[in-house]
Amino acid sequence: MAGKTYDSFLDEVKFVPVENEERFGKLGKYFTLPPGLGKGIYWIYEPNELFNIKIHDFYYNEDQVFDTDLPEGLSVTYYESISGEELSPYKPFYPNTIRTGSGGEKAFRAIIHKNIPIRSTGIEIRPEYYNNYLETNYPGEFSNLENIFRSFIATSNFPEMVSLLNQIKNYKGDGSSARLYYEAKVVEAVSLLVKYQRELSHRKKEKISATAQESIKIVSMYIHDHYADNLNQRTLTRIAGISATKLKDMFKEINGCTITEYIQKCRISQAQHLLQYTDLTVGQIARAVGYNNASRFTELFKRYTGLLPKDYRKL
């Protein structure tokens, strides 16, 4: 896995090179999906063995199941739009979310849902970057970088990183100035992620015990099974067996979002399925996932998917 390249990975997942495309600047390589499989662009800038930058803007015509190896590296990505689930371990993909990941450890197993655009911008640093380059230039300062990337997972509350990755997406430079720009953005992204994690650790008042982590896991599973119910703080606190304040703080630290946001994501995820595979009206679906107010449901659906329910169904 460590020696795998993105050219071989893209060939494996059926992307083909495309010429005369400059949507995301003149540097880098452009790929597209063959007619019938999907439509859109996969752009990757990989100047050396240190890092790469990827921008996605494509969709598949049918649900795609992936079980493949990824090149070794650590990544941070902003997903503006996506619908699907990572399978091992199970983690839904949510839009408007910063997500970290790693390749080379194990196979990437996921389902990407059809017709929903994958719009994302990401930076990946390779082993040569974090094992040699950073250690040479900043000895001892980034020794736990791999743990930071692998423990971060996902959050919808990282505006500095969203801003940085959007700047990359909108940048249209060329030549040596563009190369310097991208190199600087990689350093800035690593710095932001380390700063974010240190501040998060500093805010943590006490180490979360294995027992407390299990309590949060139970609450999360309960929400998955009862997302359409009127879930209240008192019930969830009793299920967790800890104080309301501890439940609130630890839930956000472990899951990367508040309990309310977690419930909303579960409801919207089920609503996406119902819009795709049933003939229920938008109002009926809103009630089925726990919203008596269709306007509130529509507002939240657009926040999490970038589309109105009726437009999602048309896709």
Image (cartoon, helix red, strand yellow):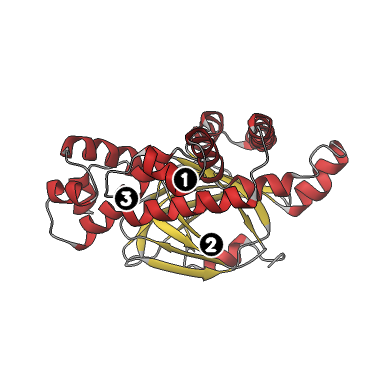
> Which is closer to the viewer, label 1 or label 2?
2
Element type where label 2 sits in the image = loop
Q: Which residue is mark 1?
A: 120
Whole-percent x, y for residue 160 in the image = 55, 28
Eye-nearest disc, 1 or 3 = 3
Q: Quadrant of residue 96?
A: top left
Q: Kindly identify the amino acid type of the residue bearing the numbered disc 3.
A: Tyr
**Element at label 1:** strand
Q: Residues within 10 Å of mark 2 (few under 14, many from 20)?
A: few
Q: Residues within 10 Å of mark 1 (few under 14, many from 20)?
A: many
Residue 258 location in percent, x, y?
A: 45, 37
- The residue sitting at 85% across, 43% down in the picture is 135
- Give me the residue at 32% from left, 67% from top: 36
Residues at marks 3 and 2, CA–CA distance in whole angstroms:
21 Å
Residue 227, numbered label: 3
Residue found at x 76% / y 47%:
129
Q: Give the residue pinned by disc 2.
A: 89
Q: Are marks 3 and 2 in contact (CB under 8 Å)?
A: no
From the viewer's perspective, is 248 left or right of 35? right
Q: Earlier in the sequence, mark 3 or mark 2?
A: 2
> What amino acid is labelled 2 in the image?
Pro
